[in-house]
Amino acid sequence: MRFVDTNVLIYGVSRAPEDADKSLIAREVLASRDLAVSVQVLQEFYVQARRPDGPCAMSDDEAVEFVEDLRRYPIQTLTLEVFWTALGFQQRFGVSYWDGAILAAAQHSGCTSLLTEDLSDGQDYDGIRVVNPFAAGAGR
């Protein structure tokens, strides 16, 4: 299983011409069946996708429909256990709490990789390997 970070979702629906290459890659990723997301990722996507000046500029209905479609994947909820794991990632690896929460959700979802451009490509965080799907030669 691979965990998908918010930036992959945003690129998947981006209307910005400069995101065209990343958008194509993100749509290929999102067509996969071996993905998981978290409630945090869904929240972040919803807020960012609705920004009128953002790359998506989606209406409320469009953003909700996209999030509803993501229900086909396993969705990790925020539990006290995920919270404590996130704090552990933050302390051990010096990442932000929010990145720690993404890593924790990935771990609790049983994922072995995290698809994101926000952390160092190839870095291993307690068995969660970061894969930047937009990096040259990235395996999708």
Image (cartoon, rainbow, N blue to C red):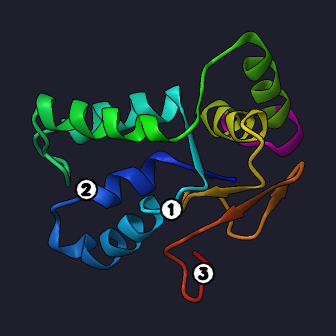
Single out the mark in the foreground, 1 or 3.
1
- Residue behind mark 2: 13
Label 1 vs 3, first from the N-terminus: 1
At label 2, counting other C-alpha atoms closer than 10 Å, the crowd grade (few under 14, some 14-19, many 20 or more) is: many
- Residue behind mark 1: 32
Spatial CA span between label 1 and label 3: 15 Å
Element marked by disc 1: loop
Task: Classify the position of the C terminus by image quarter.
Answer: bottom right
Q: Residue furthest bottom?
A: 137
Say above or below: 99 vs 64. Answer: below
Label 1 vs 2, first from the N-terminus: 2
Q: Position of residue 39 (x, y in %)?
A: 51, 26
Q: Position of residue 95 (x, y in %)?
A: 72, 42
Bounds of the magenta segment? 91-96
Element marked by disc 3: loop
Spatial CA span between label 3 and label 2: 20 Å
Q: Nearer the viewer, residue 68 or 94?
A: 68
Q: Does the stretch in magenta take in 95?
A: yes
Residue 138 circle label: 3
Q: Position of residue 108 (x, y in %)?
A: 77, 33
Element marked by disc 2: helix
Q: Position of residue 138 (x, y in %)?
A: 60, 81
